[in-house]
Amino acid sequence: MTDEVLDCGDVLSIADVATVYGTLLRLLAENKSVKIDCSQIERIDAAGLQLLYAFSKEAVVHGLALKWEPPSEAFIRRARLLGLAERMNIDNASG
């Protein structure tokens, strides 16, 4: 089975959360394995990061395979700033 790819684009903010949330709910309902691509993120706010964190926790609960495309430095910096990088298993994903 191939992974469903969630492309986060270059910005993931509170303005995008409702749309991305709908996609993530669909993936959970369809029991799809997911690859989250944050490689192009230039700006992510706390709401966007919290959504991805919550999804990563739900994926584990539902037994879904979740993979991270190597995230951008901006994404990793923000995740570390909010204390979520290690919890999301992305702390060492980049160089």
Image (tube, rainbow, N blue to C red):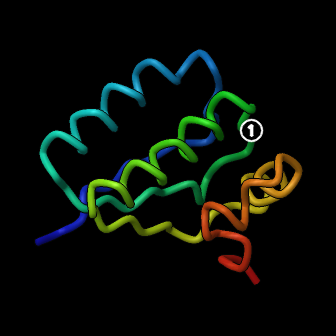
Q: As drawn, which residue projects farthest toward the front?
A: 61
Q: Nearer the viewer, residue 74 or 26?
A: 26
Image position of 4 (left or right of 49): left
**Residue 25, relative to residue 53: is it above or below?**
above
- Residue at the spot 40% in from the left edge and 28% down from the top edge: 21
- Residue at the spot 31% in from the left edge and 68% down from the top edge: 65
Q: As drawn, which residue projects farthest toward the bottom?
A: 95
| Residue 60 location (% of width, % of height) | 38, 60
Q: Nearer the viewer, residue 57 or 71?
A: 57
Task: State which quadrant residue 63 falls in.
Answer: bottom left
- Residue at the spot 24% in from the left edge and 44% down from the top edge: 28
Inspect the image, locate mark 1, and give the three-letter code of the amino acid beneath it: Arg
- Residue at the spot 62% in from the left edge and 41% down from the top edge: 10
Image position of 49 (left or right of 43): left
| Residue 30 location (% of width, % of height) | 12, 45
| Residue 54 location (% of width, % of height) | 52, 42
Task: State which quadrant residue 87 falls in.
Answer: bottom right
Quadrant location, the C terminus: bottom right
**Residue 74, relative to residue 14: is it above or below?**
below
For label 1, the SS is: strand
Question: How crowded is the residue under tag 1: few (<14 C-alpha within 10 Å), some, or many (20+)?
Answer: some
Image position of 62 (left or right of 93): left
Q: Nearer the viewer, residue 90 or 59?
A: 59
Q: Name the residue tied to disc 1.
A: 43
